[in-house]
Image (cartoon, grey):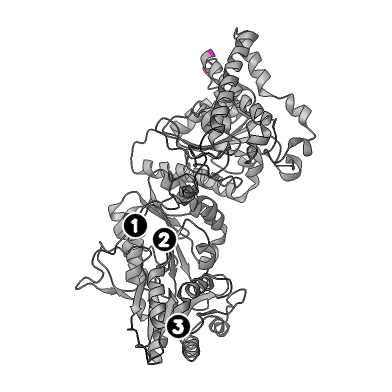
Amino acid sequence: MIKEQVQDLNAAELDTEILLKGFRNLVTAKAMTFLYEENFKVVSKYVHATSRGHEVIQTAVGMQLTPKDYAFPYYRDDSMLLAIGMKPYELMLQVLAKKDDPFSGGRTYYSHPSLRDEDKPKIPHQSSATGMQAIPATGVAMGFWYKESLGQDIDAPIVVCSLGDASVTEGEIAEAFQMAALKQLPILYLVQDNGWDISANAEETRAQDAYEYAQGFHGLDAVSIDGTDFVESYTTIQNVIKIIRKERRPYLVHAKVPLLNHHTSGVRMEWYRDDLEEARSRDPYPKFKELLKSRGLSEDELQAIENECIDVVRADLDKALQAEDPKPEDLFTHDFAPTPITEESGDRSPEGADKVVMVDCALFAIEEIMAKHNECLLYGQDVGGRLGGVFREAATLAQKFGDNRVFNTPIQEAFIVGSTVGMSAVGLKPIVEVQFADYIWPGLNQLFTEVSRSCYLSNGKWPVSMILRVPIGAYGSGGPYHSSSVESVVTNIRGLKIAYPSNGADLKGLIKAAYHDPNPVVIFEHKGLYWSKVPGTKGATSVEPAEDYVLPFGKAWVLQEIWKQEEEETLSIITYGMGVHWAMNASEELGMKDNIEVVDLRTLHPLDYDTVFKSVKKCGKCLVVTEEPSENSFSRALQGRIQEECFQELDAPVMVIGSENMPAIPLNSTLEQTMIPSVEKVKKKIQEILNY
């Protein structure tokens, strides 16, 4: 829809009360900018940006959002935050990183909101990694889309995703636009274009602006406006919101604005700007004053309003400067939300149950969950009705639960992962998957920046409840793009729970626990164990546990337990996934099942150190078995921790066996087997450490 058609919807001039409310918001934000500059040495201890020059478009949007809506402001949007009802004092608590900062408790930057107040739009946490909020925001809109497909009356809420124009060059923006256009999601992308990145301007960084770019996404209408003109901004936003609420489809508003303050407090405009005079000629403040004068207000009346706002801002800063800082112990809260699943329960081996392969344990677990919980969805590449997953791990689910609950996505790992932030924020529980562990890399930005940190940086308000399934490991000459182990990278992302089961019963119990956990969970599922086709992996098949079976995270299993022996050499093998089967088979072939204890970690975070240390101290020697290349790895870190905690009881150095430290797993089967561990290799390592 073109600009003229949007503006044709304007029925009448704006009421003067609306204009006065908007003006108050503008001069409050402006006063904060000037006060921050006036107190630069104090306020700039922590980096901040302000909305100076952007105030009008932000105010026009913020004034029209309601408590049922969701907003994803970006780091320059303090005018929008004021317009939805935040007080200068509250924002100042954040700029000074105070304990009572209502967004993060002093953990994150100014104008990085996360808000769950009943009387304001909901604002899930988002980072300042440029443009990364677009995918979580679109995930909220997709959550609305799903709820409406169930016939739920959710009163036509919308999502606003605010972006700087420079961020639209990010690839993840394209993923968000693509899904919004494809699914026709109720979201407004507000793009504020001030012509600058940091020191790079539009001419050197963009082939087109956001309005022009949006033309390539069929189903995403766009309009470009003067974001310094309050009437144009307010009425355009009013009518675009009306369209989105009624027609449930996406829209992009491209607002041209000047940047009248520094990029951030740490990057000063005078260092690089050559357009300041031109930018100041487009200042929205004098334009707004002239508009109000045309409505009969005098200069004195306007100055009185501004003075009143300045007084409030000054008093609020004085008060905020005296506010309490966080205490050291405040560091250690809200890394995870409490989970109700803390003990193993239910029937693991029900009488008369069939023995099934590992992949079917996962399939049946998800089917049982979806049958009971309408808020559960499954999506990813090729999981829909035609195929049901490349490993048939979602077979028949789309036919049983519908294409709105089990559906294919484009090839967009970032969207698959990051959209769960938004889906979770509206009360859904997404189960998503990347097709192979090798494909997780495009999703890591969202997994690290948005998913894992949301609970901590929102001070506990927005934990992300999601499950990410990741088929992993080498099997059947998958080659360099279908065989990698990636747990060392993922375990270094704090704020995730991570499972890596070795058998079907554990997989089913952990999926059930993960579903009821309010935190993000990654489940690594070794594709070589799915059907137990790899020689020596029959132990991955299981009697299918009952529907009520749950297995909590952080509980290792002493799969092969021995007694303490003073006269014999004994060994504790600490392992997980495929390593469990190499360890069990190696001990059997060596005839040493009474001398080798095997501990299956089952989850990599939380990790059951108590069980590990108890086993190692009992045995006196330890071998960590992994499929990953061992250098700089999760297993090396575990080796060091064991050595540190169990040093007095050790009779030999803790050792590790893993894959060869090569860049990739080759396609050729001989080279593949040369690279990865095997029963024979584990046997040799066992003999080496026992003979130490």
Q: Residue 11: give x, y in percent of width and height.
A: 51, 17
* Quarter of the rendering containing residue 274: top right
Quarter of the picture containing the N terminus is: top right
The residue closer to the viewer here, 411 or 691, is 691
Helix, strand or loop at mark 3: loop
CA–CA distance between discs 2 and 1?
A: 9 Å
Q: Earlier in the sequence, mark 1 or mark 3?
A: 1
Label disc, if present, on residue 386 of the rendered structure? 2
427 falls in the magenta region: no
Mark yes or no: residue 690 visible: yes
Q: Identify the residue position indicated by label 1 in the image.
A: 399
Q: Earlier in the sequence, mark 2 or mark 1?
A: 2
Q: Looking at the image, is mark 3 or mark 2 nearer the viewer?
A: 3
Q: Main secondary structure of the magenta part?
A: loop
Left or right, 351 with reference to 213: left
Q: Is residue 486 above or below residue 419?
A: below
Q: Identify the residue position indicated by label 3 in the image.
A: 621
- Tag 1: Cα neighbours inside 10 Å, few (<14), some, or many (≥20)? some
Q: Which residues are magenta?
A: 9-16
Q: Could you tell me the amino acid type at mark 2?
A: Arg
Q: Is residue 243 above or below residue 140?
A: above
The residue closer to the viewer here, 479 or 451, is 451
| Residue that appears at 73% across and 26% down | 280
Q: Earlier in the sequence, mark 3 or mark 2?
A: 2
Q: Could you tell me the amino acid type at mark 1?
A: Gln
Q: Residue 477: give x, y in percent of width and height.
A: 52, 78
Q: Residue 337: give x, y in percent of width and height.
A: 39, 51
Left or right, 471 with reference to 538: right
Q: Could you tell me the amino acid type at mark 3?
A: Lys
Pointers 2 and 1 in contact (C-beta within 8 Å)? no
15 falls in the magenta region: yes
Residue at the extreme right of the image, as rendered: 274
